[in-house]
Amino acid sequence: MSRRFLHVGLLAVFLVLSGCTGTPTTTPAPTPTATEAPSDAYTPYAAELRIENPSEYTVTVETYAQTDAGETLAVNRTTDARRIDLDDTFKNGVNYRVVVRVNGTEQWNETVFDYEGVTLLVTEEGTVRVDSFIER
């Protein structure tokens, strides 16, 4: 009989040491991390505008930032450069009205929205047309 108690005693010690005594252990639930934005969330871009001027006309570009307070002149640049890149002048989330004059005559007056990229071409005749357009 003492052998039986020894086996039961050893079994009890083994169960206690192995953690199988039936006492539940709780693991805390993981805390949520940063929530993900919905997939349709709008991320503001900055408008993109380039003007190709292969005939080197004198081109004046005026851009007007459009805000709730109205329009504000952002850029007034006159140049005869073959390529005019205004990307660095635009701010994220702002739409711009763009006026392009070639040799003093207004040839283009449109709004470029913050999600648009536009490349204009000054033709040999001195008119302005959209050469490429992207929406992001």
Image (tube, rainbow, N blue to C red):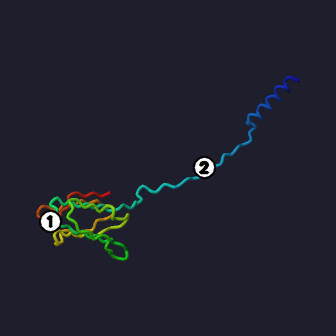
Name the image quarter holding residue 45. bottom left
- Residue type of the residue flagged with mark 2: Pro
Residue nearer the viewer, 55 or 14: 55
* Residue 101 horizontal/vertical position (percent): 19, 70
Total marks in image: 2
Name the image quarter holding residue 68. bottom left
* As drawn, 70 above or below 111: below
- State the separation of the CA atoms marked 2 and 1: 63 Å
As helix, strand or loop, the secondary structure at mark 2 comes to loop
Q: For the N terminus, give its image quadrant.
A: top right
**Residue placed farthest to the bottom in the image?**
69
* Residue 51 horizontal/vertical position (percent): 23, 61
Q: Earlier in the sequence, mark 2 or mark 1?
A: 2
* As drawn, 20 above or below 40: above
Residue nearer the viewer, 37 or 63: 63
Residue 114, label in figure: none
Q: For the C terminus, give its image quadrant.
A: bottom left
Which residue was labeled with disc 1? 127
In the drawing, does residue 69 fall left or right of residue 1?
left
Residue 30, label in figure: 2
* Residue 102 horizontal/vertical position (percent): 17, 68
Residue at 20% over, 64% down: 80
